[in-house]
Image (cartoon, rainbow, N blue to C red):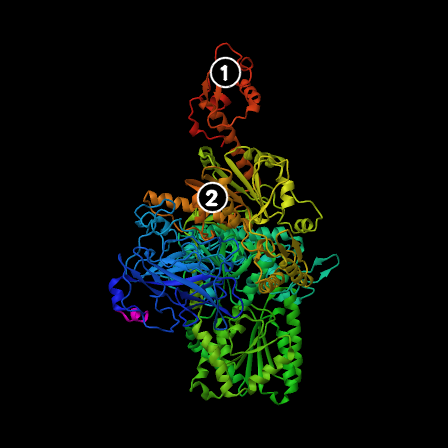
Amino acid sequence: MSSFEQAAGVSATDDKHSGGTCGVTFRVRCETLGHGEAIFLVPDGTDVSITFQGTPLFTSPKTFPWYSMSSPKLLTLPASSVKKPTAPPPPTNDTTTRDSITRGIATTGSSASYKYRYAVFRAGEFHRWENPSDGPSDTFHGSHTVLGVDGYDPRDEHPPHILPLRLFVPNEDYIVGDVLGVTRGTADIEKIKVRDAPALPQLSDLHARSSSGALKNNSGRSMTSLSRLDSASGERNSSYSVLPPVEKKVGFAPTPSPYHRPSARVSQRSVNLSNTDGLVVASAFLPVHLHRSDDGVWTADWDYEALLSMQTHLRVTRVGTVKWRGWHGNFMPGRTAPRDDELSPEFGVPVEERGEVERCLRPFNCVPVWCDASKFGEMYNGFCKGVLWPIFHNVTSVYSNQTEGGGASVDPLDESRHPAASEESEQYSEYCLDDVAFPIHGDGGQEATLWSAYTEVNRKFADTIIQCFNEGDLVWIHGFHLLILPSILTRRIPMAKIGIFLHTPFPSSEIFRTLWCREDLLRGMLNADQVGFHLFEYGRHFLTCCRRLLGLNYGMIPDSYGGHNLAIEVNGRHVTVTSIHAGIETDVYNNVLMQNLTIRKATTIQNQFQGKVIFCAIDRMESLKGIPLKLLGLERFLLRCPEWVGKIVLVQVGISAFERGDDYFKTKSEVLKMVTDINRCWPGTVQFQECKESEMRMQQRISLLRASDVVLVTPLRDGLNLIPLEFTISHRDALTEQGRRDGRQRGLCILSEFSSCTRVMRGALHVNPWKISEIANAFHQAVTMSEDERMRRVSTAWDFVRRVTTQRWALAVMLDLKGVYKNLDVGRYSGAGLGLGFRLLGMDTGFDSLDVGDVAKVFKNSKNRLILLDYGGTILKNDNMDSIARYQMVNNLRAPSVATKEMISAIDELCSDTRNTVFVVSGKERHALTKALGHIPNLGLAAEHGMFISWPVANIKHRRQWTTLVPDQDNSWRSIAISIMEVYTSRTHGSYIEETEMKVLWQYRDADPEFGYLQSRELEDHLSNVLKSFSVDVLHGGVEEGGYVEVRPKGVNKGVAAMHIIRTYEKFQSSRIDFALAIGDDHCDEPMLSVMRSVGRRVMEAKLARKQEPPLPPPPATVTLVDVSACDDFVSPDMETFTCTVGKKPSAAKNYLSEVDDVQELLDALNKITVRSSFSDLRMLNIDDGNVIPVGVDLPADHSETICAGIIRSASMGGFGGFGSKKACLTNEEPMRVSQSLGAYMGNLQPEEEDDDDDIFF
């Protein structure tokens, strides 16, 4: 015998006569415990006043109200003939889950069971046993029935729980679920795993009762519900029970949070990238340099300074435009681009030589995108640089030119204003014509032109990518030049995993919302599967824009590989947001550092400033780079520390930025003036040199950075800037003993807080460039820093540069992109919208438009039909999405919308068929629902999510009678909830309170989205704590519509109402339901749709089990699993269920209808079938001596004349007797024969067509 069995108190004699052991974890639902109270499981027969043997159960905020054991309890199972233990287990005070379980076991033949109770302890002392008042209010608390087990006394004040041990199999683990205070019936039992034996055969038929009790194998599921196994073996153990056991009602699972949706059910596995993975990289320009010889021969080499030029083991195809001689489209206002067939190097590669360029780029796996020169210029220079660039850098006017006169923009190339422009026009034309020079915010009235160019170029990129794409490839888009490219690609290759990465900052929502095309840009990015940024700060701005402008929600969600990602939920899809900063390729820079030319240039610069601390800065000549502020900081430092005059030098390199127009010339003029002033006071302090970008390439930069001691990067707002990383690798030897021998205080960076690399270069000195004193202090700190501190800072900076290379950055982003779950089934996704409004909707497999023909065929052959319809959004247009309309209705400022006459007529006609039971289940109040639909006979109404139910009645002359779903309770919670909500309403603008007869809501749909959500979470917690002693639910939902916090009686929702209607169905029909249709439109209807779909799934599983066919696949993630076994006795084993949502969106429903008009068409079609089948039943009339007896059709006697008249009007119907006067009915002497089909009667179908094959108007 194992030590585990010994610890459990099972003797060797017990093991000899037992059938083995199993592990059982008990869990109980308990919502009535107060502060300081705990719950213990105690075996039956334990006298807690003398000795205590119990097992504690624990809970957590995530699992409440469920309390569970920390580890399984070991139960000894009886053999076919169980004998009592020869020696009782020794007494023990062990309260762990491996205590003795011999106590509490009753054995009588085949009915061995384990009895136990739950005890409530307070402050560590026994307080009381569980009692029926601890159970839910809607749970049966009637008298207990004798179950035939020895020791069971129905008169026991505290009856025990009885667990039949024959439900368990040795060497397996189970979970037993109870409800505190509910002891009647069998607990919910789930087999969770097999310890030593193969998988247990599972129950195959959930509806039919097996005579032998044998279990058939059903290996398609991982968990088995055995709660009804007891009833399945009832014939075998007839002595065990007098009445069938009642399954304990556990109720619905806790309501999930408004955002978090269960992840797709996929197996977790590791993700990796191999050389078989394909990658298509799209960027505005290819990372290559093109060269053309005088004889027309094209050559190319890698642009190693480009971030995307890194080499990798993947199969990479790069897509972009070619940049030859600085060509960016060369678009300027008033200038006309030549045609594509005109030869001009200033406007790109000549058309007839594009084939040669393509062949030249083929070894590099680069595919060029050929665009019209003027269109690309308008896109790149006009829209990207002129509109998006300043917006993305959180400025709206820094590049705007002053207007003169009537607002005409000033040409920055006006030679009268800037003579330098004329002198440098050649380099301007060759390298820099990459920006528009006119007022950019408002775009000078050129919104349509620039946006058209932007979309056209993006479509050109999409065409090229489609040609290069192979199934399974990843698509990685770079830069703000291609923000709408994911929308275009998703329409054509929806199964591709698409990522987009921005190398610029992302603006705050207040700046971004000033763009006229903001929604199109955001939706374009959200059509990707992953959006990447260098910093979380930029990603946070993006999330805020999506929340505020599009009303989307975001949070951490599990992925398919076992991790969690920050993601935005968009139309049933999850768009991952990645924040990973890029690095540099150390091998490339090490190679440049070891070149003799680099060493010579660095030595020359050091000798030029021998004995001085060299500060260097390399910036473009534009306002955003903050050069004037840097010079002001230097000036203040020298004023405060004159002892450093002549001991430091600032080498400032300015890259000409002609594309910035007026801003460039203004910045250049200001910098030159400040440099002159500083050098006048302290000669030789600032060495300023302006150069073209082509003159400051990698080798020139590395030489200057190697010679310098400190680098300054102080932009006002900047995206990816690799200068600090290049400077750090240039001085990596400062950490070695040999490198410190030169005595230089080198390797320190001074970085602006507004540069992206500030977050990763933790060893740098961080400054606010707007605060001059901080810059001056940074100068002083750099020259006076101790050796130890400097070494620590340099080491910290070098650690990031060494660890995060460009390849590792790209690998991390690609792993995140590949880890994004995207179902390979094309049916899992569906497109919606036109143009740039196109969006990809994530749907469950098989989520298709409702096939009315399928519904009609089943409806026609059914006899007992249940139809559940939502109200707003289903049978009438939903005005709940309109915030103003909602507010006006709540405050009685406008009348609520009502259904059309045609819809009411269709429902009325549907209710007239006695085979139909129709319910409208709404969130409206009773009086509103009665006023709108109360006049329809035989129509059931469920108001306020099913709290109040009016059952179908034929006579509606009297006032409708209403019943409640839950019993009347103490309503004092309403005043408490309202008083608390009023406090939050007073401090949350745009919020208001909505009261109904059942519930109280705090609406914050008109409040600030983020502040309103924060307030709602605080209110939710506040109400939950204050109202925990009341039987109410505090719900937080409707986030899609703006959001609300609701307090309603516990156990009220449309799902519970649907189950209640099914269990009460026998009041209206004598037979079981064989047809069910449920239609809803919003989140309030999801419980009803989940219940109805679960009922239909349960029937289908039983049907497949009877046929010994494979089981159904797991339900989709949108379906909330609900225990619907209580409905088994009220549904037919052959029932067909249809669930439908109005609108194409993720839902628990199986199908969808596009709009309310489609719902009316469906109801009209069902009514036509009803009329048709009524006439078809006339063929079954029995005629005997002139008396007509209709079979299957109820014909009231007082309507005989009307029926007769209807028959007479048909020329194809035969004569009948028995309906009023025979002469009135017979118009011909020769009797007319009865039509054999409805087609013969209606005249629109061929007579020989079979009735069952008719398409019935579809």
Say whether residue 1010 is left or right of residue 88.
right
Quarter-wise, where is residue 209 in the image? top left
User: For residue 424: magenta?
Assistant: no
Secondary element at tag 1:
loop
In the image, residue 1003 lies at what x, y percent? 64, 56
Numbered range of the magenta stretch: 1-8
Which circle's residue, 2 or 1, is located before the other in the chain? 2
In the image, residue 1187 lies at what x, y percent? 49, 18
Q: Residue at (62%, 66%) from the top-left corner? A: 423
Whether residue 457 appears in this view of the structure is: yes
Secondary element at tag 2:
strand
> Distance of mark 2 from mark 1, alpha carbons?
47 Å
| Prevailing SS of the magenta stretch | helix
Q: 489 or 846: nearer the eye?
A: 846
- For disc 2, the marked residue is 848
Rendered position, 277 above or below 795:
above
Q: 320 or 243: nearer the eye?
A: 243
Identify the image quadrant of the N terminus: bottom left
- For disc 1, the marked residue is 1215
Say whether residue 969 is left or right of residue 370.
right
Q: Residue at (66%, 73%) from the top-left corner? A: 670
- Furthest toward the bottom, the residue is 643
Eye-nearest disc, 2 or 1? 1
Residue neighbourhood size for the residue with mark 2, other residues' Cα within 10 Å, grouped as few (<14), some (14–19), many (≥20): some
Report the amino acid beneath label 1. Gly
In the image, residue 480 lies at what x, y percent? 54, 59
Whether residue 301 appears in this view of the structure is: no
Report the amino acid beneath label 2. Asp
Residue neighbourhood size for the residue with mark 1, other residues' Cα within 10 Å, grouped as few (<14), some (14–19), many (≥20): some
